[in-house]
Amino acid sequence: MLDPGSNKELPEIPAKRYFTIGEVSELCDVKQHVLRYWETEFESLNPVKRRGNRRYYQHHDVLKVREIRDLLYHQGYTIGGARLRLEGGRRPEAPSADPQLLQGMRRELEEILRILG
């Protein structure tokens, strides 16, 4: 198994419908316990669970793991930052500034400057 920070080329993803956690671990160069942790942190990473709670990842899950790996290990994102990035970078929108409110604030600041001046 490679160091997570390694830049070695990852193997090609075989044309299969399902992959075990062990296979995904090798295909993505990420330890199995890390994959299980990422499932708790990233909603979009949700492998099918079957008998005995065994995980079966699909092709899109393997691609998602590789994307998460790249964000965390190569681009330097934190877990929270990677989560935001994967959600499309959505952030709460700032309320639009009310022109009258801004004018009032400006007048007050000018008054303060005049007093201090």
Image: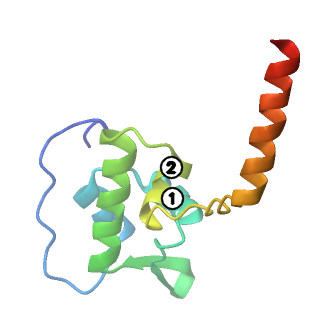
Q: Do the residues labelled 1 and 2 touch (CB within 8 Å)?
A: yes
Look at the image and tell me in which quarter the C terminus lies: top right
59 vs 87: above or below: below
51 vs 111: above or below: below
Task: Tell me the distance, in whole angstroms, between the alpha carbons under discs 1 and 2.
Answer: 5 Å
Quadrant of the rendered structure where residue 55 is?
bottom left
Q: Where is mark 2, residue-wise?
A: 81
x then y, percent, for residue 50:
50, 87
Q: Identify the disc placed on residue 84.
A: 1
94 or 65: which is nearer to us? 94
x then y, percent, for residue 8:
14, 42
- Residue drawn 43% across the image and 64% down it: 86
- Residue drawn 79% across the image and 21% down it: 113
Label 2 crowd bin: few (<14), some (14–19), many (20+), radius 10 Å: some
Q: Which amino acid does label 1 sit on?
A: Leu
Instruction: Give the farthest residue toward the right.
Output: 115
Q: Identify the disc placed on residue 110.
A: none
Disc 1 element: helix
